Image (cartoon, rainbow, N blue to C red):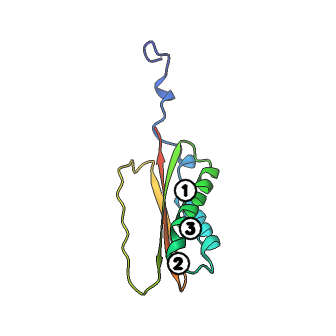
Amino acid sequence: MDGESGAKASDFVTEPAFHKKLKVSRVKELIAGVLKERLTGAVYHADNTSAWAREIADEIKAKLKEEDWPRYKYAVQVFIGEQRGEGVRLGCRGFWDSKTDNYAHDTFQNESLFCVAAAFGVYLY
């Protein structure tokens, strides 16, 4: 016991057990499945992309929550652009614990559009 609080040091978990950590390969599978399902056959139109990006991000986030990795919170970013033969660079920064937090991303493209989706899982201490 720790003083008067009655809490033991072992009661304060600062990282998940190995089998409870966010699985990057599984997250990538989820992202790829959503992108393929939602964007196969889609044609780029600027008026649609904002709603599509929001819907895709929400669907990926919901699927991540279904995986039930305890104490993880998620952030999902989705970028949709028109295929015009030009390159694009995307980047992000974050402050996190590399022992517990992680991310995965995947891309989708067809003749009309490209999409990059990234999902970040942050463990709450």
Across and down, in percent, residue 51 comes to 55, 65
Number of the label disc, if any, that sits on residue 23: 1
- Which quadrant holds residue 89? bottom left
Number of the label disc, if any, that sits on residue 71: none
Disc 2 designates what residue?
45
Q: Specify few, some or many for label 3: CA neighbours under 10 Å numbering under 14, 14-19, or 20 or more.
A: some
Q: Specify few, some or many for label 2: CA neighbours under 10 Å numbering under 14, 14-19, or 20 or more.
A: few
Give the residue type that dot 1 points to.
Lys
Q: Residue at x 57, y 57 (%)?
A: 58
Q: Secondary structure at mark 2?
A: loop
Would residue 88 appear left or right of 68 to someone viewing this image? left
Q: Are marks 1 and 3 in contact (CB under 8 Å)?
A: no
Across and down, in percent, residue 9 comes to 46, 26
Across and down, in percent, residue 32 comes to 58, 69
N-terminal of the two: label 2 or label 3?
A: 2
In this view, the mark in front (2 or 3):
2
Q: State whether residue 3 is above or below residue 117.
A: above
Of residues 4 and 93, the one nearer the viewer is 93
Q: Give how far apart the Cα atoms at labels 1 and 3 are.
A: 26 Å
Q: Residue at x 42, y 48 (%)?
A: 99
Q: Secondary structure at mark 3?
A: helix
Disc 3 designates what residue?
52
Give the residue type that dot 2 points to.
His
Q: Residue at x 60, y 78 (%)?
A: 42
Give the residue type that dot 3 points to.
Trp
Q: Give how far apart the Cα atoms at labels 2 and 3 are.
A: 10 Å
In this view, the mark in front (2 or 1):
2
- Which quadrant holds residue 62? bottom right
In this view, the mark in front (1 or 3):
3
N-terminal of the two: label 2 or label 1?
A: 1
